[in-house]
Image: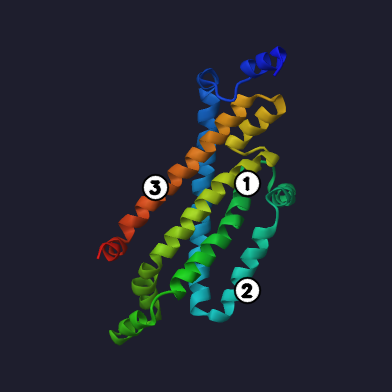
């Protein structure tokens, strides 16, 4: 490496604590935006996905069309989807949120349906024998037994959403993606890598929190593994 190249790398490092200190306000604002978008998108998608999955489970003929429609929406490139939505919903948070909810729906609907369908038939028969009707069977028996699959779907949807939020930069609202894009434009390595590392840390933190919540909600699964 030439001396000029070494000087350039030294002046433009990939890791820089000085960058973090000088730009902590920008980093905190972008991280907060990224986090709130992720949480809101997954919560909204879950509220929509749960009744859709329950409907698909109780009406098996609807399962294939619902999952298929969600799958078609998932195949649309995120940049293209944001570009299509922008003329109708404007530039900013609403457009990004709609896109994120759309992508999270497939993961959630599919996992909830798989979880509900995976409940042992003997369990259902026992509940029916105790006088459980369809609604009570769903709420008191099938959904609790499907919790491991549901939590797995929420974890996957959340981690995927953390990554997709960065693409929101195309409509001016991308959380940490804004800093990545700014770093690419200015070729500022520290800005690119810092935003990337924060994005990875956020995904890991969300996944660990949801993993812990899943363990709390399904204590029987822990006891089953230890026996």
**Residue shown at the point (54%, 45%) measured from the top left:** 162
Q: Position of residue 132 (x, y in %)?
A: 33, 82
Front disc: 2 or 1: 2
From the viewer's perspective, is residue 69 above or below residue 24? below
The quarter of the picture where the C terminus appears is bottom left
Q: Classify 222 as above or below 126.
A: above
Name the element at disc 2.
helix
Q: Position of residue 225 (x, y in %)?
A: 30, 63
50 or 91, which lies in front?
A: 50
Residue 118 occupies quadrant: bottom left
User: Which comes sooner in the sequence, label 3 or label 2?
Assistant: 2
Q: Looking at the rendered structure, which numbered label has been put on residue 209?
A: 3
Query: Which of disc 1 and disc 3 is earlier in sequence?
Result: 1
Residue 37 or residue 113, whichever sits in front = 113
Say whether residue 72 is left or right of residue 161.
Answer: right
Q: Quadrant of residue 214?
A: bottom left
Q: Which residue is mark 2?
A: 65
Q: Residues within 10 Å of mark 2 (few under 14, many from 20)?
A: few
Q: Position of residue 61 (x, y in %)?
A: 58, 81
From mark 3 to mark 1, how far is it between C-alphas?
Answer: 24 Å
Mark found first going from the N terminus, 2 or 1: 2
- Give the Cα distance between marks 3 and 2: 33 Å
Q: How is the image coloured?
A: rainbow
Marks 2 & 1, CB-CB < 8 Å contact: no
Q: Mark 1 — residue?
A: 96
The tag on residue 112 is none
Against 160, residue 53 (above or below) is below
């Amino acid at each position: 490496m030439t001396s000029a190249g070494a000087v350039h790398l030294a002046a433009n490092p990939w890791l820089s604590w000085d960058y973090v200190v000088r730009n902590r306000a920008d980093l905190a604002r972008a991280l907060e935006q990224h986090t709130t978008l992720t949480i809101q998108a997954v919560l909204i998608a879950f509220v929509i996905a749960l009744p859709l999955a329950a409907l698909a489970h109780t009406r098996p003929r609807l399962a294939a069309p619902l999952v298929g429609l969600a799958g078609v929406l998932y195949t649309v490139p995120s940049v293209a989807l944001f570009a299509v939505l922008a003329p109708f919903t404007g530039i900013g948070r609403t457009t990004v949120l709609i896109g994120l909810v759309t992508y999270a729906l497939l993961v959630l609907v599919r996992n909830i349906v798989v979880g509900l369908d995976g409940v042992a038939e003997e369990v259902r028969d026992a509940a029916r024998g105790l006088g459980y009707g369809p609604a009570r069977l769903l709420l008191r028996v099938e959904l609790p037994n499907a919790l491991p699959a549901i939590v797995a779907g929420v974890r996957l949807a959340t981690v995927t959403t953390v990554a997709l939020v960065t693409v929101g930069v195309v409509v001016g609202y991308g959380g940490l993606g804004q800093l990545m894009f700014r770093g690419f434009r200015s070729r500022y390595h520290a800005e690119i890598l810092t935003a990337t590392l924060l994005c990875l840390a956020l995904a890991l933190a969300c996944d660990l929190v949801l993993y812990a919540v899943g363990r709390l909600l399904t204590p029987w699964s822990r006891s089953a593994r230890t026996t």
